[in-house]
Image: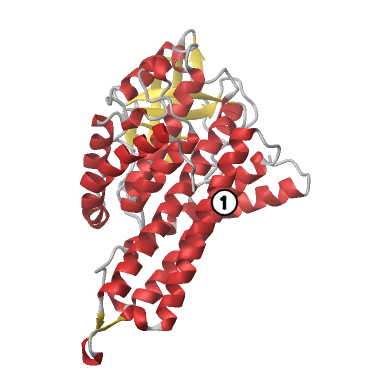
Amino acid sequence: MYRLNDEQNALIDRVTKVADAVIGPNAAAVDREGTFPRAGIDALAADGLLGLTVPAEYGGLGQGMRTAVAALDVVGQRCASTGMVTLMHLCGVACYAAAAGSSPDADDALRAVAAGRHLSTLAWSEKGSRSHFWAPVSQAAQEGDRVTLTALKSWVTSAGQADGYVVSTRAPGGAAPTDSTLYLVVREDAGFEVAGPWDSLGMRGNASAPMNLKECEIGAGRALSEPGQGFPRMMEILPCFALGNAAISVGIAEAAVQSTTKHLTGQGFEHLGGSALAELPNLRARLAQMRIETDKARAHLGAILDAVEAGDPAAQLLVLEAKPAASDAAMRVTDLAMQACGGAAFSRHLSVERNFRDARAASVMAPTSDVLHDFIGKALCGMPLF
């Protein structure tokens, strides 16, 4: 449904091979043990796929959101944790690319990503402003060409695992929360630490932990936006996050459909002569509902990609719809899967139970479904979003 060209399809074939060989086989252990999916990320890096959206002039594959969405769908089907780590990396890369040419540090980071040596992520949400990720309460201090960052960041995906962190903070002298600047903080910088473990209901391997910056001093050249222009840059990156997040939700739904289909057609009633579970019409009906919901969600995502690429005036509204629409679909599909598979799902014999838990994550991930529903309502009523 993503209508990829031959080059894009070839790249998705590469992603699929890595996903089938490494990401999928490790997914259950990543979930069970709550461990970071390092093997899968390293495999993507080794094949140059972490550089999927890095511009070709920096050594990357030069792809846009359509290919990225298809790749995240594929990865999300195998392991939602790996999908989320990859998505946040692509969002970080988008920040580097937006600053390319004006920031030597961003240029160097792009080259390192293309070479498979750099994993990125975002550090935007803060404890003080919670799911309002666009409104940091921290404020940078600057003296000469040195900037000092002090902030309590919450839910930083790949915390302690990523090599580069795109950190938001109110600009020196900024008054409003949206008077922010984005900076690149690297793992070797002194003054930041992971503030706690990640032990979650779903997406248990994405290491989304709090991160504290305590007088983290960096060069002013690490800025990834103009001073005080972090908010507009965040809005530029929002489509990447929203569409990518939706793709992972669609992938989770697809995984539940495939697992349920395999269960219903592969298990039966011995006392009834071996008739398959699929012979029960109520179970077939649930599977049909799952297929329809998943196809609708993927088609909706494809239509949003079309609108974004065409510069459609409705694209902004559609981008706001992407994440809650796909998240709601994934929750409905996985709920049906739990009912269709019964005890086999509850006892964790299938991926369905993991899919069920993973599907719940997107709705509470900033911007939450509640926040996005409010934004959509405001847009429809002609009201300002912020």
The furthest residue to the right = 382
Colour setting = secondary structure
Is 339 above or below relative to 360? below
Q: Secondary structure at mark 1?
A: helix
Task: Compare residues 23 and 117 and report the one nearer the observer.
Answer: 23
Residue 3 position within the rendered picture, expressed as x and y whole percent measured from the top left: 49, 42
Residue 311 position within the rendered picture, expressed as x and y whole percent measured from the top left: 65, 33
Q: Write down the quadrant of residue 57 in the picture.
A: top left
Is 23 above or below relative to 329? above
Residue placed under numbered mark 1 in the picture? 300
The furthest residue to the top = 144
Residue drawn 26% across and 41% down? 18
Residue 358 visible in this rendered orientation of the protein: no
Residue drawn 52% across and 43% down? 242
Q: Amino acid at mark 1?
A: His
Residue 96 visible in this rendered orientation of the protein: yes
Residue 349 position within the rendered picture, expressed as x and y whole percent measured from the top left: 24, 69
Residue drawn 52% across and 31% down? 138
Is 336 above or below relative to 274? above
The furthest residue to the front = 6
Is 49 above or below relative to 77? above
- On screen, residue 308 versus residue 108, left or right, reads right
- On screen, residue 206 versus residue 377, left or right, reads left
Residue drawn 21% across and 87% down? 270
Task: Compare residues 133 and 218 and report the one nearer the observer.
Answer: 133
- On screen, residue 348 versus residue 89, left or right, reads left
Location of the C terminus by quadrant is: top right
